[in-house]
Amino acid sequence: MTACLALGEIEKCVRQNHIIRARPIGHSSQLFTLMFLNSPSGMAEMRNLAITTSGLYSLSVGKIREIAIPLPPLAEQKRIVAKIDELMQMCDQLEASLRQSQQRAEALAASAISHLTI
């Protein structure tokens, strides 16, 4: 199960019948709610409430209403979202750096092999 945030980017979007639209109520940041639902704690909460058949999890609208989302003050929610965004950008940069290092290592290995076989 994965949660996503749709902001109306696609006009006249049609959802499949197993997708449920939910809107947080109260003083909740949409991004904070999304990040919680996709966190290990949020995923565990959804799995505990879900029914499963053949390994496929299903949540009814009633069960979705039962999901307990810990809500710090709105300012703290926004700070948490900003920090997660910052950390995710760092992860993206590290991933790109690792890809470049791997490409350089492969090129170096290919060059070494070609010099040894000549």
Image (tube, helix red, strand yellow):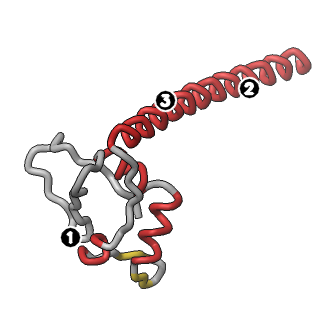
Return the x and y of residue 70 as percentages of the image width and height. Answer: 41, 58
Q: Is residue 65 left or right of residue 95?
A: left
Tell me the number on the disc at residue 17.
Answer: 1
Q: Residue at x 50, y 67 (%)?
A: 44
Measured along the vertical axis of the image, is residue 33 above or below residue 100? below
Q: Quadrant of the N terminus?
A: bottom left
Residue density around tag 3, few if under 14, some if 14–19, many if 20 or more, within 10 Å: few
Amino acid beneath label 2? Glu
Measure how far apart labels 2 and 3 are at the Cα level: 30 Å
Tell me the number on the disc at residue 44.
Answer: none
Tell me the number on the disc at residue 106.
Answer: 2
SS label for mark 3: helix
Residue density around tag 2, few if under 14, some if 14–19, many if 20 or more, within 10 Å: few
Return the x and y of residue 16 as percentages of the image width and height. Answer: 21, 65
Q: Is residue 32 left or right of residue 44?
A: left
Q: Which mark sits nearer the N-terminus, 2 or 1? A: 1
Q: Nearer the viewer, mark 3 or mark 1?
A: 3
Q: Nearer the viewer, mark 2 or mark 3?
A: 3
> Quick one: 39 or 109, which is closer to the camera?
39
Measured along the vertical axis of the image, is residue 43 above or below residue 55? above
> Quick one: 6 or 29, which is closer to the camera?
29
Q: Is residue 59 left or right of residue 116?
A: left
Q: Residue at x 89, y 21 (%)?
A: 117
Residue density around tag 1, few if under 14, some if 14–19, many if 20 or more, within 10 Å: few
Q: Which residue is mark 3?
A: 86
Q: Which mark sits nearer the N-terminus, 3 or 1? A: 1
Measure how far apart labels 2 and 1 are at the Cα level: 46 Å
Q: Most extreme residue toward the right, as rendered?
A: 116
Amino acid beneath label 1? Asn
Q: Which mark sits nearer the N-terminus, 2 or 3? A: 3
Q: Residue at x 42, y 35 (%)?
A: 79
Measure how far apart labels 3 and 1 are at the Cα level: 35 Å
